[in-house]
Image: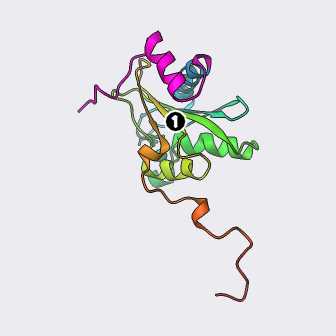
Amino acid sequence: MSSPNLLFSDNEADVSQAAKTYGITTAQFEALLSRSTDAKATAYCPYSQFRVGATILTEDGAFVDGANVENAAYPVGTCAERVAFGKAVTGGHRKFKAVAVATDISPPASPCGMCRQFIREFCDLKTPIFMFDKDGAFIVMRLEQLLPLSFGPEALPPPGSLTAARG
Ligand SMILES: O=c1ccn([C@H]2C[C@H](O)[C@@H](CO)O2)c(=O)[nH]1
Ligand SMILES: [Zn+2]
């Protein structure tokens, strides 16, 4: 069932309101929408035919795109979000302002559980995740809403602090 109270349309009022609420510019919002929508075309998804595009806005204002990459051994395939974060992190980015995911369904798809946890490694809990349908209508939620009571890097002892003697 759709969630009309959560689904915004791509009109000027909703876009500027969302951009303001989530701390990005309307130009950045429009770039997240157009780039994640275009990224769907780069998906390799012969098995599901379900195209997903993802775009990440880095803290310094760069954009990194990804799409899902499937595999004949089905579980080996990778979601668009993890492809985009892999590219961003190996490109040297460590801080991010927003994440966008675009699909051709409405209401739009939301990141799977594995991707929510993957995002949690690199993003502040307040980070907005924009989920776009084919027409640019969108749902937006913060990471802490998509992944409540989450487990993250700060729960572990600092890397290198454990002694080798302890098994
Ligand atoms: O948020 C999502 C949901 C699904 N998929 C991919 C995985 C698979 O390739 C296809 C169908 O599940 O869509 C993503 O990339 N991101
Ligand atoms: Zn996923």
Residue 11: percent from left, percent from top: 44, 11
Q: Quadrant of residue 7?
A: top left
Q: Is residue 2 magenta?
A: yes
Task: Return the x and y of residue 162 as percentages of the image width and height.
Answer: 70, 78
Residue visible at 61% across and 22% down in the picture: 28
Q: Is residue 72 visible?
A: no
The residue closer to the viewer here, 106 or 94, is 94
The answer to whether residue 80 is above or below residue 73 is above
Front residue of 16 and 139: 16
Q: Pointer 1: residues within 10 angstroms few (<14), some, or many (20+)?
A: many
Residue at left offset 42%, top offset 44%: 145
Determine the residue located farthest toward the front in the rendered image.
Answer: 21
Colouring mode (rainbow / by chain / secondary structure / one colour): rainbow
Q: Residue at x 57, y 45 (%)?
A: 82
Quadrant of the frame with the C terminus: bottom right
Q: Which residue is mark 1?
A: 128
Badge 1 marks a residue whose secondary structure is: strand
Q: Is residue 78 magenta?
A: no
- Residue 156 visible in the shown view: yes
Q: Which residues are magenta?
A: 1-27
Q: Nearer the viewer, residue 30 or 39?
A: 30
Q: Amino acid at mark 1?
A: Pro
The N terminus lies in which quarter of the figure? Answer: top left
Query: Residue 142 vs residue 30: left or right?
Result: left
Q: Residue furthest left?
A: 1
In the rendered structure, the answer to whether residue 25 lies left or right of residue 129 reads right
Q: Is residue 87 above or below residue 166?
A: above
